Structures are given as C-alpha cells and as structure tokens.
Amino acid sequence: MHPAGKIIEARLEHLESHLEQENPILLRTVKSFRVLDEVAFKLGLLQGDSSFATQIPWWPLISILGTFSAGKSTFINHYIEYPLQRSGNQAVDDRFTVICYSKEASAHALPGVALDSDPRFPFYQMSDEIEKVARGEGDRIDAYLQLKTCPSPRLKGKILIDSPGFDADAQRTSTLRITDHIIDLSDLVLILFDARHPEPGAMQDTLKHLIDQTIGRPDTGKFLYILNQIDTTARENNPEDVIAAWQRALGERGLTAGRFYAIYNPDVAIPIEDEALRTRYEQKRDADLAEIHSRMEEVEIERAYRIVGALEKTARDIEERCVPLVTQTLATWRKRVLWGDAAAMGGLFVILLLLSIKAGYWSGLSFNPPWLTPGSNPLVPWLLLGGLVLLLGAIHFGVRTLAAKSLMGRLRRQASKAELKGDPSGAFVKSTKPWRSIFQRSPAGWGRKARQRIKQVIQNTDSYIQTLNDQFTNPSGAEKRPLSELEPLGNGQPVEQTQPADEAPAGQTG
Ligand SMILES: Nc1nc2c(ncn2[C@@H]2O[C@H](COP(=O)(O)OP(=O)(O)OP(=O)(O)O)[C@@H](O)[C@H]2O)c(=O)[nH]1
Ligand SMILES: [Mg+2]
C-alpha cells in the first residue's frame, strides 16, 4: 500500500497496468518511484495525496494542429491504420480529441472528464487547467475535449491529439488558450497546412496565432511544419515550386526554424496521371512521411530517457538538496532556540531574583524564604519547583515554535527557487515536532536505511539507462524499434533489487 493511501495506490496500479500493455520497458521505474515516495513520506517531503510518479507525464504527447480541412484527421487515421476520426470538407469536429491505446477491439469515445482520472495524461486534472486558462469553463470540459481509445498498436505508448480546424474569427479565445496549453504540454507538434491554399493570404488569423506562438520559443525543435495535400498541385505545378513558395510565405511571417515537410495522403489523393510526375511526388511524400513517422516514434524513446532522468533527479534532489537544506535550517533553528531559551530563561531568572529581593527572601547572600524555614509545609517547595519546571518547559516549547515559524518563510522561498522535487518545509515541520530533541542533527526520517534506499534507486537508474541504451543505440544500423515492442527493463539482466540491503532477511546483513 502506498503511504499516501488508497487513491494514489489505485492510480499507480492503473499506471502499472497501462505500462505493462503499452510501455513495458518503463514498468520497473514505477517501483523505484514507489521507493522514493516512501522515503519522502517518512521525511515529510511528500504529504497528503501525492506521489513523485504522478507528478511526471509518462506518455509523450503529439498534437496535430492546423488549418480547417487541412487533412489532420485523415493524417491520423492513416498513421494509426484505423478509421477512427471522421473527415470531410465541412468542419466535422469542434473539439480536441485525445487519442490513446486500448486493447479493446473497438474504438471508444469517452467524455472529456475521463481524462481527469487517467494517469496516462499529462493533463491529469485537465479541467483545473482549463479553469486556469478560461475561467468558468472548467466544468464544461466535455465541450472542449473528448477521449477516444483505439486498439491500433501504433498508439501504444503515446497520445495523439487531433484538433478542431482553425476557423478564423469564429475561434473562441478559450479554444485558443487550450491550444497554447496543449502546445506547451506536447513533445511534438505537427502543424498542417493545406496545399490548396498555401499562400499567406489564405492564412487565417488563428493560423497566424499558431505560427506566432511557435516563433522564438526555446523548444522550436518540436514543431514540424507540414504542407499537406500536395497531390492537388500536380496538375499545374511541380512540387518543388509549391513547397518553396509556401516556405517563403512562412519565412515572411518570421518562421525560419523548424522542419518543413510536404506530403499527401495516399488513401484519398487525386490520381496523378503522368508517371514521371507521380514518381516524383511519391518519392517526396514517402521520404517526408517516413521522417515524420520516425519523429513520432522517437518522442516515445526520448520520453523514456526523460522519465529515468526524472527518477534520478528526484532521488538526487532528496539526498543532495532537500535533506541538506532541511539540515541547514535545523541547525539555524537549533541556534535560535538556544539563544531564545537563554534570553527568556535569563530574563525569568532576573525577574525572580528581583521579586525575591523585594519579598525579603534574602538575608545577605543567603536565601531564606519563609517556605524553607523549619516547620513550614514541606510540600510548598516541591510545588514551587514543579511550577518552575513547567514554566521553563513552556518557555522552551514556545521558543521552539517561534523559532521554527521565523524560518518557514525563508525555507519556502529557498525551496521554490531551487525547484525541488518534494517540499522541504514539510520535512522541517516534521523534524521540529515537540518530541524531537533540538540536538538531533539530521531531519526526521533520514537515517542509514533511507540513505541506502536512495543510493539503490540511483544505482538502478544507471542500469535502466544502460538497458535503454542497449536497446536504442544501434551500431549495426538496424532500425529503431518503438518502446512498445521492446522487452521490459532489466528483463534477463542483473538489475539490482530496489530492496535496500538492511531490509534483507535477517542474517544476511551485518
Ligand atoms: N487530395 C487530398 N485530399 C485530402 C488529403 N488529406 C485529406 N484530404 C481530404 O480533405 C478533406 C478534409 O480532411 P480532414 O482529414 O477531415 O481534415 P481536418 O483537418 O481533420 O478537418 P477539420 O477537422 O474539419 O479541420 C477530406 O475530404 C479528405 O478526404 C490529401 O492528402 N489529398
Ligand atoms: Mg478533423
């Protein structure tokens, strides 16, 4: 059972079952994330309903955007080799369709809310995101998104998004903002243009918006600009001229980076009579289509490396950044508590001294209060002593609380600046609980066992990377295979156990 409880446990199991079907190579990494979760919960770095595994997007996202009727849906159907999306010359879809794999024999359309609970989606809790970009629309997620599942093996391990055609002014701002959000989340963005109207005059406002969005971003590499339906130009032109004119038009809009392709869909193309011309068109199309498809496979591989990278970063963050930050803050806290105690208790001593002088308890340097003289009630001194101890205790714990509070703001700022995985302020609160001595230097939950578990996870990430490398670097020149077809991580390989040494059965550890 996950330390966060049933909800997270159910989500992780859901994630594991999807990985088993679609991306078995990553299955073992979930186990490592579970180990990190446990350590982080003990430390207080994670709290409530959370897990490091649910903070990262597991499935790469490929979005297909473009002008109205550019052939987006037809392109997707051709790629997945399945007639999933409706196509036609009228605007047939006004919603984004999130398409993912399911082994069920028939395709399913689910309401957008289903996206909110599926761990595969980077927009887990998409309605929150929609609410953020378009206030008041979060409850209407179904008006913007639908989810379709389909048994095409090409969908394994990835998610495609088909978008509504961009129809100039009719475009609602919320749709535009969702598009921007989807672009941000996507690993690969295909922007389809229609060769029937490639010239800038035909470029609608929204397409301009799309292009302007993609210019000057740090991740321009993820945009592929595709001139589709070039078969329609075969009668009048040769493809090179059309493509050049289109690229020039884009260049005039400031778009120079990125990759440009020209394709058409063999299933619906207008037949090209001239044989030589047809061959030229087909060669161009096949070369470009192959490249586009291979980019679509590559994102799956890149994503796998990124997940292992995130695992390692999380482990290292805990050990090398979170714990030191908390330890440091604890040291400052200890100093403040000691100084605070000294000041408050010193003050109390002076007050008591003055009071006792005023009460005439002193004769010269000897302390002679009436309740210590023989014959007085013997309980009184003990009661007074008890009262004093309570008072000192109250001072000490009051000082501890104040000192801890005085450090929280700074700690939170440092943590958010460092962009840490996990929340050091939670660990600090846990480490300053009343039953912890101020002289304990390491944070609560950070001991030999925790350290070993982190070390083990880091070692495991090395072997995961090694497995990925073995399967993807292909000195023999063999074709890269998508992840979904590969053996699970560590299969038949001596991948280290995630179980720490000190948890091994008794008698095996020293
Ligand atoms: N000649 C030719 N026609 C195509 C090609 N690709 C798509 N079409 C046709 O263009 C029309 C629009 O295709 P869709 O796939 O519906 O286009 P879309 O971009 O999804 O359209 P919306 O979702 O409405 O924006 C359909 O009639 C397709 O058959 C192509 O490469 N060549
Ligand atoms: Mg469509």
Image (cartoon, rainbow, N blue to C red):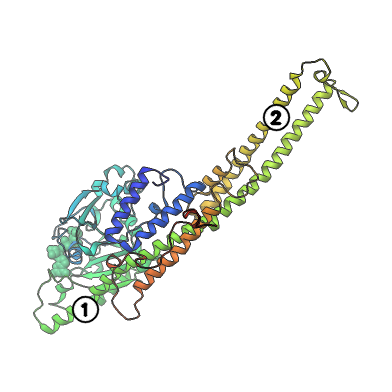
For this view, does 339 lie left or right of residue 165?
A: right
Left-right relation of 117 to 196: right
* In the image, residue 276 above or below residue 225: below
Q: Are marks 2 and 1 in contact (CB under 8 Å)?
A: no
Crowding at mark 2 (Cα within 10 Å: few <14, some 14-19, many 20+): few
| The residue at label 1 has a CB less than 8 Å from ligand 1 | no
Q: Can I make out residue 427 in this image?
A: yes
Q: Which mark is residue 158?
A: none
- Give the camera-side residue of 493 and 335: 493
- Can I make out residue 177 in this image? no
Residue that label 2 marks: 389
Horizontal and vertical percent position of residue 115: 28, 50
Q: Amino acid at mark 2?
A: Val
- Element under disc 1: helix
- Quarter assignment of residue 463: bottom left
Percent coordinates x, y for residue 357 in the rendering:
84, 24
Dot 2 or dot 1: first in sequence order is 1
Tell me which residue sits at (91%, 26%) in the image: 364
Can you identify the residue that label 1 sits on? Answer: 284
Q: Residue at x 64, y 49 (%)?
A: 331
